[in-house]
Image (cartoon, rainbow, N blue to C red):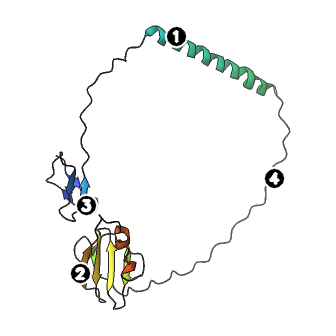
Amino acid sequence: MKPLVCLQCGGKITGYSPSQNFAACAYCATKIVIEPQKPASQTISDKQTIKNSSLSLSVLVSLIVGACVVVGTIFFIVIPAVKKEPKPTLPVYNPPSYSAPTPRVSPSPTPNPNLLEFGGKGIGDDLFRDADKIAVDEQGRIYVADETLRIQQSNEKGEFLKVWQIPTETQYYKRARSVRKIGNFIQRYSA
């Protein structure tokens, strides 16, 4: 029994049977469909006999057709092309060379300092995995949705408050994952 890997959190899934249709991740509770293994085919076809006479006849016909194509190509394309005199060509215009001016070097802008940093990379509380939506409500609470199917709430100082799991079985999964219904969209963020 080879180990499976969870597509959401990357954890190993063990303790499943190949006869089961589903397995669940112990870390993030993601259900994974297990493809049933098909038995090896052991049937032998009865139509594998080929007559030698029909095979040799088809080879002979294809050789004759191929020879005719080669001879026709030589007579109709190569020989008339060799006998033709070349047409006079016009002189080629060479424009004067032009060198582009060197670009001016401008100083790189200094980055703005971060106003607030919180959390880290992972799948626990106050940890994010590919966070892609951030919102702030009127009280200054920060909401972050990430790829682990959770929305995490932090206070205005970045301290963790609570977490909500997003149910994937409902038709509102995409809407619940969009933080816009809780607060206003701020920026796209990747942890």
Q: Which residue is mark 4?
A: 93
**Image location (x, y in percent) of residue 92:** 81, 49
Secondary structure of the residue carrying tag 2 is strand
The reply to whether residue 190 is visible in this rendering is no
Asked which secondary structure carries label 4, the reply is loop
The numbered dot on residue 10 is: 3
Q: CA distance from mark 4 to mark 3?
A: 63 Å
Q: Residues within 10 Å of mark 3 (few under 14, many from 20)?
A: few
* Residue plotted at (37% across, 81% down): 135
Q: Is residue 63 above or below residue 150?
A: above
Quadrant housing residue 130:
bottom left
Q: Which residue is tagged 1?
A: 57
The residue indicated by pointer 2 is: 162
Going from N to C along the chain, the mark reached first, 2 or 1, is: 1
Asked whether residue 158 is in view, the answer is yes
Instruction: State how far apart marks 4 and 2 are (Cα).
Output: 74 Å
Give the position of the C terminus as an image quadrant: bottom left
In front: mark 4 or mark 3?
3
Q: How far across and down, in percent of the image, does residue 121 sit? A: 28, 72
Q: How far is mark 2 from mark 1, CA to CA?
A: 80 Å
Between 90 and 60, the residue placed more toward the observer is: 60
Mark 4 / mark 2, whichever is N-terminal: 4
Q: What's the amino acid at mark 2? A: Lys
Amino acid found under the numbered disc labelled 1? Leu
Identify which amino acid the numbered label 4 is placed on: Tyr
Marks 2 and 4: in contact by CB < 8 Å? Answer: no
